[in-house]
Amino acid sequence: MKIAIDARSLEGNKTGVGRYLENLLKVWQNREDCEFVLYFKDKIPDKDFWGGENFVLRQLKNPLGFSSNFFFQHILLPWNLRKDDADFFFSPFYLRPFFCPVKSAIVLHDISYEAHPEWFDRKSQFVLKIFSKISAHNADLIFTVSEYSKNEIVKYYKIKPNKIVVTLLAPDSGFHMERNETKIRAIKDKYGLSKFVLCVGTIFTRRHIPEIIDAFDKFSENNGDYQLCVVGKNRTFPFEDVDAEIEKINGKFQKKKIVHLGFLEEDELMAFYSSCCAVIYLSDYEGFGLPVVEAQFFAKPVLTSHNTSLVEVGGESVEFVKKNEMKCILKSLHKVLEDKDYYNSLVFEGGNNIKRFNWRECAERTLMSILKNV
């Protein structure tokens, strides 16, 4: 069985989609009944699991010389799918070629652009609302990451539920608890951190970073030894100047109370998860909410929103912030960080909750569904 995969998400800095695909491939690398043809656009990255004989790596160069995602996806991909005699095409992102010569599957991680188009600029709305909907209807199979997202796809796209397969995500298989205190201290010193709360994820409008910052400002008036570390690029729309607010608060306290970092290398991220006091991850809409289970993997208590897939993923193991408003966030910060018994109970329940999520089960369910649809 020859399964072709759009592997562009593995190029460059590892994104959420790239992590998703990489973890699937790590499980699939020893399958003797399948050959995986991975198509790249600009560069074939170095990966420690490429050694398997069932991986074929191909860079599809544009013969016209210019770089274009559209040309790659709708011209080069279908041409090479036919040329390589592929049996199935798998896209870990939202899109597939307009004219796909073989059966196909796409992954819809969420469809927030349908539920809240006001969070996206016109270009993103056009690409996602139109092209992903066409891809979803034309694909033979759709994967998504929670029952909540499955219900949203049925609601907005009017697709039959039996075409949609839920495969739960998990913490990156490369993650491990960092126990080298010297290394942790060096990384924290590099960024000016000591005792801190961690907030990880691309900064979208729906994730209420300004409200988290305001709540932490108030919290710090009586808890001066804590810092807040926000990790993620600012993709707010309309744009919210998060850094200006951080600078204002740091000026007020005359020290680094809040640190904003756009990107962390994986070893730094593991050190941050291993050494933070707690993780806060708020949102108005999530298809899964990976930082929730990542934090629990590192035995950290989680503060998150009581809505969408976050209720499903967090279960009874997290501190649900009643509303994504400053006063409610502040109340939850006090509850988690000042009540040691409650803090420990969240760590314990998180350890039980994390057992529900693993990449082997996700990867095997994905591949089994593909093989049944060839």
Image (cartoon, helix red, strand yellow):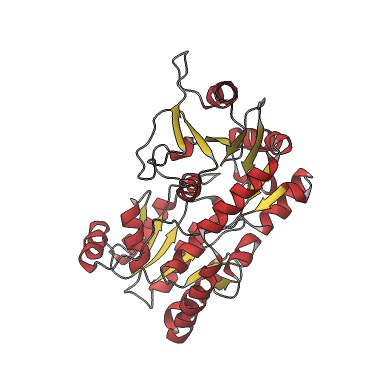
Residue 151 position within the rendered picture, expressed as x and y whole percent measured from the top left = 73, 54
Residue 190 position within the rendered picture, expressed as x and y whole percent measured from the top left = 23, 57
Residue 364 position within the rendered picture, expressed as x and y whole percent measured from the top left = 57, 53
Q: Is residue 258 left or right of residue 32?
A: left
Quadrant of the drawing holding the N terminus:
top right
Residue drawn at the location 60% of the way across and 42% of the way down: 120
Residue drawn at the location 60% of the way across and 63% of the way down: 310
Residue drawn at the location 68% of the way across and 35% of the way down: 135
Residue drawn at the location 43% of the way across and 78% of the way down: 337
Considering every residue shown, the one lying at the far bottom of the view is: 341
Q: Is residue 99 above or below residue 317?
A: above
Q: Nearer the viewer, residue 113 or 217?
A: 113
Q: Residue 353's quadrant in the figure?
A: bottom right
Quadrant of the drawing holding the C terminus:
top right
Considering every residue shown, the one lying at the far top of the view is: 64
Q: Is residue 160 left or right of residue 94?
A: right
Residue 202 position within the rendered picture, expressed as x and y whole percent measured from the top left = 47, 50
Q: Is residue 316 above or below residue 248?
A: below
Q: Nearer the viewer, residue 342 or 234?
A: 342
Q: Nearer the viewer, residue 151 or 129?
A: 151
Figure disc tally: 0
Q: Would you say residue 258 is visible in this rendering?
A: no
